[in-house]
Image (cartoon, rainbow, N blue to C red):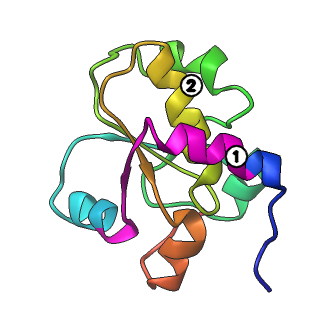
């Protein structure tokens, strides 16, 4: 069953997506397979992260990312890929940290659901 999001939520997501770079699940898989250096950040709730996440991902929930990003990733030019369940919360988080001066931020469209649907490996 597809998730039905509230219209106002979709409105702010679409607004954020107009300012945020996005990539596909397979793009992130290719970057990981190539050994590329970047920060992979799961912005879902802690309970979601604990059940499973992308290999090597760190957790910075959307609710605290603005508070904790500078302590966790001090370099504002470091490449960062954010993901969530489907690509909406990560777009909002990417928009927020771009406002804080982070310059190389990408939101993974499809998120955890897309990663799993593609059959890519996970860890818990």
Residue in view at x 44 percent, y 75 percent: 121
The answer to whether residue 41 is left or right of residue 85 is left
Q: Nearer the viewer, mark 2 or mark 1?
A: 1
Q: Nearest the camera: 17 or 122? A: 17
Q: Which residues are magenta?
A: 10-26
The residue at 56%/25% (across/down) is 96
SS at badge 2: helix
The residue carrying mark 2 is 96
Horizontal side of residue 33 vs 39, given as left or right: left
- What residue is disc 1 on? 11
Q: Nearer the viewer, residue 44 or 96?
A: 96
User: Is residue 72 something one can see in this rendering?
Assistant: no
Relative side of 3 to 83, left or right = right
Crowd tier of the residue under label 2, counting other residues whose Cα lies within 10 Å: few below 14, some 14–19, many 20 or above = some
Measure how far apart labels 2 and 1 are at the Cα level: 16 Å
The kind of secondary structure element at disc 1 is helix
> Was residue 95 drawn as part of the magenta stretch in this picture?
no
**Magenta stretch: residue 25 in it?**
yes
Q: Name the residue rendered at 52%, 84% in the picture.
A: 117
> Which corner quadrant of the image does residue 51 belong to?
bottom right
Crowdedness of circle 1 by 10 Å Cα count: few (<14), some, many (20+)?
few
Looking at the picture, how far across and down is residue 93, in whole percent?
A: 58, 35
- Tell me which label, 2 or 1, sits earlier in the chain: 1
* Image height of 67 relative to 4, above or below: above
Q: Give residue 37's position: percent from left, percent from top.
A: 22, 42
Measured as percent of width and height from the top left, residue 76 is found at 34, 16
């Amino acid at each position: 069953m597809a998730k039905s999001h509230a219209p106002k939520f979709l409105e702010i997501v679409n607004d954020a997506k107009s300012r945020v770079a996005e990539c596909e699940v397979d793009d992130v898989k290719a970057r990981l397979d190539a050994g590329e250096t970047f920060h992979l950040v799961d912005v879902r709730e802690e309970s979601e992260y604990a059940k499973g996440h992308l290999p090597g991902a760190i957790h910075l929930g959307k609710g605290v990312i603005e508070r904790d990003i500078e302590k966790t990733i001090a370099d504002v030019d470091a490449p960062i890929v954010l993901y969530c369940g489907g690509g909406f919360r990560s777009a909002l988080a990417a928009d927020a940290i771009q406002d804080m001066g982070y310059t190389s931020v990408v939101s993974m469209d499809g998120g955890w659901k897309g990663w799993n649907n593609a059959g890519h490996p996970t860890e818990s």
